[in-house]
Image: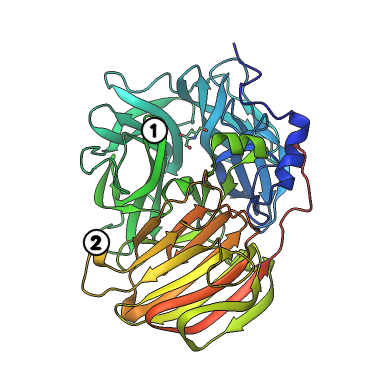
Amino acid sequence: MTELTHPLATVPRDELVARAEADPHRPRFHFVSPAGWLNDPNGVGQWNGTYHLFYQYNPEGAFHHRILWGHATSQDLVRWTDQPVALEPTPGPDADGCWSGVLVNDRGTPTLVYSGRHGERELPCVATGSPDLLAWTKSDANPVIPGPPAGVEITAYRDHCVWREGSRWRQVVGSGIRGRGGTAFLYESEDLRAWRYVGPLLIGDASASDPADSSWEGTMWECVDLFRAGTGTLGDGADGGGGQSLDALVFSAWDDGATRHPLYWTGRYSGDSFTPQALHRLDYGGRYFYAPQSFADDSCRRVMFGWLQEGRTEEAVVASGWSGVMSLPRVATLNPAGELEFAPVPEVESLRHGHIRLGPQAVSGFKVVDGVEGNQLDLELDLELEPGSVFRLGVLGTPSGTRDMAEETVVEVGYHVGGGGAEGSYVLLDRTRSSLDTSVDTGELAGPVALPGGGLRLRVIVDHSALEVFANGKPLTARAYPTLGGGSVRISAAGIVRLRQLDAWRMEDVFDGPRPLFP
Ligand code: DQQ
C-alpha cells in the first residue's frame, strides 16, 4: 500500500511554500519547484515553439518520495510558467512513483516514456498527452517492457532515451550488470508499446578505475542520453571517426544508491552498438550537476539541463521546505579536440542589468571589484595568464570587503604548461571558506582546462546557493551556503595575469513571488 505520510514530512504542507520563499539560499533566476523536492529534468523539449520542462517532484516535502512529474513551460528557456502536474502515481506499475523519462513526438501525439516504480522495481511506461501537453493519459499497455533482459543479473534498471530512426523507434534503458559495470540496454519498436530487446548498446567496466576517482564509471548508468554531437543526426551512418560527427552517450554514474557524477562517452553509434572512443567528465561539479537530459531545439541547438543537488544536511534541507535546483539550460557543442563544451543559452542574458566593465589591467594582490555586489550575478572575464600563474575570483564574499573576509567562495584557474594530470592547467572551486556553517559540504571540486596561449574565458553565474562556472567551455557546477549574506566580488592573482576585460551584471528574478504547490 502506498505510504501517504513519510517520516520526513515534518513541515506542514501549507507551510512549505512560505518556508522555501523565506530561505536566503533559494535561487531566484534558476528554475526551482514551487516548494518541496525537485530532482531530475524530464521530458525536456520544444513543442510548437514552446519549451517544456518536466521534473521529478515531491510536493509533500523536501525529500525524495512518491515522485510526480512537475511541469513548466517557457517561450525563452528563462522565464517559466507552472503547469499542472503531468504524471502522478496511480495503482499499477507506477503506484510508488513516476520516475525519469522523456518526451517524444509520435506522429503528432505528445508521448512520455518514463519509469514506473512499484515496490523496489522500475519498469518502462508510456503516457500520451493532449495537444497542449497539459493532460496525460497512461497507456493500458503499461509496463510496456515486462522486465529487464532475462538471464542477466542487473544492479538496477530505469530511465530512457528514445529516438526515431527510419521507420522504427529505438530506446536505451539505463542499467548495470553485476560484477561488470554500467550499461544501456537497446530496444526497438514500431509503436512505442511493443518493444523487442536488441542487446546492450555498450557495457562499462566498473573495475577500470578506482571507485574514488572522479571519472569512475559506477555500477549502474542512470539517465542515459544518446545524441549526435556535431553535424548530422543519430544513426545516419555518418563517419564518426573525424571531429565533425561524433556521438555522445551521456550517463550519470550511480553505485548502490550513491549518485556519483555525470560522464559521457564519445564514439560512434552504428547498427546495434556504440563503439567508444573516450570517456570524459561532463561537469567538474560531480553530483552537483546530476542526471542531465538534453534535446535538439527548433534551431538545432543541443540544449541540456541538469539537477543541482543540495550540499546541506538532510535535516536542514527538510526544514528549509525545498530542495533541488535546475541548472540554467546550456548549449553543448563539440570542440576540435572531440570533447563537449558548454555555455548557458544566450537567452539568459535578457535577465542582465546594471552593467559594470573593468579592464584592461594587470591583476595583482587582492582587488574588490567595486560596484559589483550581490547574490544574483553574471560575470564574464577575458584573461591572459603567463605560465606558472594562478587567477582567483572570489564571490559570495562577506560584504565587508576586507582581506580577511570570513566567508568567500573562490574560483581558481591555474596555468601550467608542459604537464599533464595534477600538473596541468585546471579550474578549481575552493569552498573551504564558503560558509561558517560547518555542516554544509565545502569539499574541493576541480578539473583540467586547456588554456591555449594562456587565454581564459571565464563565466561565473551566482544565484544565491547555486553556482555555475564555465572555464573555456568546461563546466563546474556547485552549491555554496554563506551565512553572512555574502555578496562581494574580488579578484587576485599569483604570477602574471592580465585582465583584458571583466563584465558584470546583476540578474533579475524569473518568478514574481510564491507559487502554488499544485498549479
Ligand atoms: N532519479 C530518478 C531515477 C533516476 C534518478 C528517480 C537519477 O529515475 O535514475 O527520481 O537522479
CB contact under 8 Å: marks 2 and 1: no
- The disc at residue 321 is none
Q: Is residue 496 above or below residue 279?
A: below
Q: Is residue 466 visible?
A: yes
Q: Earlier in the sequence, mark 2 or mark 1?
A: 1
**Amino acid at the residue labelled 1:** Glu
Q: Quadrant of residue 426?
A: bottom left
- In terms of secondary structure, where does tag 2 sit? helix
Q: Is residue 396 above or below residue 172?
A: below
- In terms of secondary structure, where does tag 1 sit? strand
Q: Residue at x 59, y 29 (%)?
A: 67
Q: Residue at x 40, y 47 (%)?
A: 262
Please state which of residues 108 and 455 is positioned toward the viewer in this rendering.
Answer: 455
Which residue carries the number 2 mark? 421
**Amino acid at the residue labelled 2:** Gly
Residue 349, image x and y in percent?
A: 63, 68
Which residue carries the number 1 mark? 188
Residue 218, image x and y in percent?
A: 32, 38
Q: Residue furthest front?
A: 404
Q: Residue at x 53, y 72 (%)?
A: 403
Residue 116, image x and y in percent?
A: 52, 25
Q: Residue furthest top?
A: 1
Q: Is residue 322 above or below residue 366?
A: above
Horizontal placement of 268 versus 370: left or right? left
Q: Is residue 301 visible?
A: no
Is the residue at mark 2 in contact range of ligand 1, meaning its CB lies under 8 Å from it?
Answer: no
Q: Residue at x 65, y 70 (%)?
A: 373
Q: Quadrant of residue 506?
A: bottom right
Q: Quadrant of residue 224?
A: top left
Residue 109, image x and y in percent?
A: 61, 37
Q: What is the distance, in whole Å, between disc 2 and disc 1 at their CAs?
A: 41 Å
